[in-house]
Amino acid sequence: IEADTANMARGKAMFNLFCENCHGTGGKGDGHLYTSGKFAIQPASLVSERMLAAPIGEVYHVITMGWNTMGAHGPQIRPDDRWKIALYVKNSLQKNIK
């Protein structure tokens, strides 16, 4: 999937809908569900060194199948939207680390 304006916008919208509550706006694992105390285990940082090195396919796979305490989102998110979320993570969140 090309990192064009439409795909990046859709990826951001889907990230905001499905990922932001746990991973936070910047992907640091500091979303509302964790900071409010409703979720006891801190979600993974999507901007850690490990995730910076991960290929886009790994991000897609984790969204689809889940990992550790993160549940699978494959049944909830269409495949093309999962790719757009992964694209947004790799080409926006990870490029704009603050």
Image (cartoon, rainbow, N blue to C red):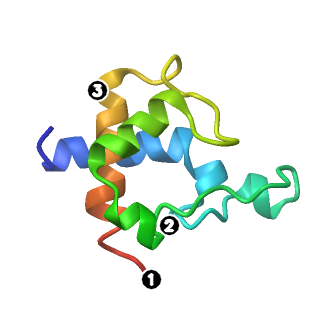
- Mark 1 neighbour class, 10 Å CA radius: few under 14, some 14 to 19, many 20 or more: few
Circle number at residue 43 = none
State the SS at label 1: loop
> Residue 51: x and y, percent?
42, 61
Ranked by sequence position, the earlier of labels 2 and 1 is 2
Seen as rendered, the residue at the extreme top is 75
- Mark 2 neighbour class, 10 Å CA radius: few under 14, some 14 to 19, many 20 or more: some
State the SS at label 3: helix
Q: Is residue 7 above or below residue 82?
A: below
Amino acid type for the residue under numbered disc 3 = Asp
Amino acid type for the residue under numbered disc 1 = Lys
> Residue 24: x and y, percent?
59, 60
State the SS at label 2: loop
Q: Quadrant of the C terminus?
A: bottom left
In three-dimensional space, the C-alpha distance between marks 2 and 1, rounded to whole angstroms, equals 8 Å
In three-dimensional space, the C-alpha distance between marks 1 and 3, rounded to whole angstroms, equals 28 Å
Q: Which residue is mark 1?
A: 98
Circle number at residue 80 = 3
Q: Quadrant of residue 25?
A: bottom right
| Nearer to the camera, 25 or 53 | 53
| Nearer to the camera, 36 or 86 | 86
Determine whether label 1 and label 3 are within 8 Å by CB.
no
